Image (tube, rainbow, N blue to C red):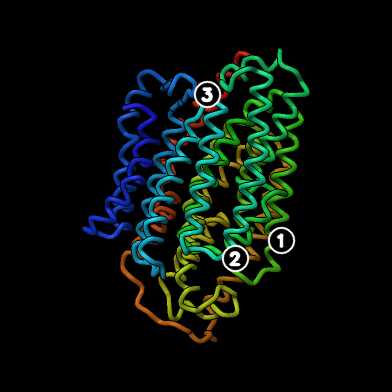
Amino acid sequence: MTPIFLIFIPALFALLMPLFALMKIVELRFVVALFCLLLCLMPLPFLESIQESGVIIQNINFFSFFEVTLTMGFFELMFITFFSFVSFVISLYGLSYEALSAPSEDLRRSISFLLALAGSFGMLLSSNFGNLLFFYLFTNTSIYWLIKSNLGTEAARKIYLFSNFLSSSFLILGVFTVYQTLGSGDMYEFGANLKNMDRFSLYMAMGLFLLSFFVKAEIFPLNVWIVNLYKESEPQNVAFFSAVTTKAYFIALIQLLAIFFKLSPLLQEAMILVGGISMVFANFHALRELSIKRVLAYSSMSQIGLIIMGIGYNLHQVNEGIFFHLINHSLAISLMYLSVGYIARQYKGDDTGLLRGCSIAMPISSFFFTLGAMSLMGFPPFSGFFSKLLILKGFADYQLFTPILFIFLASLGEALLYFRIIRTFYSNRPSKLIKHTIVPNLMYASIMILGALVIYLGVFPSSLFFIVSSGVEEFMNGKILIPIGIRAFQ
């Protein structure tokens, strides 16, 4: 088995969905959930090969003019496995969430979900700028059709369509600039020849790449559009965007930054500043919001700000905490969106005033929302505590107190935000429950799986930390794609 199968098989299953629909043996949602479960096992055969021989590089030529270059190391394997698992949990939730859609929309949703997953894997594995552009556009289009499949309002579709146009235009121009300057899109060659390339073209390409990925990876100040999208979309969509596709864009950005930091050291300082401002701005701006979905979107911006600030320092121990926190944030934010999504459906809205005292009618969903919030705030014994502790310890070891100050300010904003919501949930003067239905067991199962992981990784962080540490070691030592190119430049 080669890395191309991790992209090809989800895409193939997506194309087979019309056949499953015609057979009418089982609902398409069950097929998607089962496939995502099987997908969790697909990366395992690569583990032994990577441990023995290191990074797997695959070159494929199609029709003598289109080349696909994929690179898989432990770093990519870790995130592909994680994304597969989170996608399975989200699809499990979707089995029971009552979507008022026609069978044709159910088919479109299933196809789009799997294609977006395949595109996300493609972005992680790409080691060619042309391939990265292809999978970027592929993922953007798939997500748009996922939103269009009657799981989001017309406003959400327009918002996402505009963001697609803007970000894709930037990336197309950036890739065109690289090809014009270098003559190829090979990332190895690009990283190795930075010294010999035209500086103006390099800076132009760098700026265009950053603008493109800042839009899609929820990075300040080009991330404000995401708030309205998350507000208008259904919970399983939002959880998938935030935990999988946005993180795929973000990891692709991190790999590009590994090159661009060597091109312009000032860029590291810019990332630190952008991350710090985003952390504080997002949390305190969210204090004015009444919609819980919008609050969670701003909170997500703050967490991404913390991660991008840490990447700017590029320190080993800080990076361990950063990548651990990337996983923890995906788990916690998915847990919170899925928990509050069904509550909001019962109460016909997600404003805090409507959901006052909702813990009385829906205690389990309220409890797991609270659990996710406690993790993001960094309270023990939840997983977010350990990753934030690692980040703070890393900064303290290098006597970097400014980022520590930003983290504490952001944590204060998070505490004000989430304790306000938690107090509303557990008010003894409940609002009237507009619609009351029994929550399906599979829906509870999905949030319980995520909740159990948030607790387990807080109590036993070493079980994941060893994997994250190995991935960071590979990233820092130049064994994965981008740092290999940089090594020739140093």
Residue 325 appearing in the image: no
Name the amino acid, label 3: Leu
Q: Which mark is residue 333?
A: none
Name the residue at 55% across, 66% down.
153
Q: Position of residue 307 (x, y in %)?
A: 61, 43
In front: mark 3 or mark 2? 3
Foreground of the two, 72 or 154: 154
Name the residue at 64% across, 36% down.
171
Q: Which residue is mark 2?
A: 418
Count the numbered circles shown. Answer: 3
The earlier-in-sequence mark between 1 and 2 is 1
Foreground of the two, 272 or 253: 253
Is 129 placed left or right of 87 in the picture? right
Residue 215 appearing in the image: yes
Foreground of the two, 422 or 277: 277
Quarter of the image with the N terminus in it: top left
Q: Which mark is residue 481?
A: 3
- The quadrant holding residue 420 is bottom right
| Contact check, label 1 and label 2, Cβ < 8 Å | no
| Label 3 neighbour load within 10 Å: few <14, some 14-19, many 20+ | many
Name the residue at 65% across, 28% down.
176
Name the amino acid, label 1: Phe
Q: Which residue is mark 1?
A: 284
Marks 1 and 3, how far apart at CA: 38 Å
Q: Vertical placement of 453 versus 270: above or below?
A: below
Name the residue at 49% across, 21% down.
65
Helix, strand or loop status at disc 1: helix
Marks 1 and 2, how far apart at CA: 12 Å
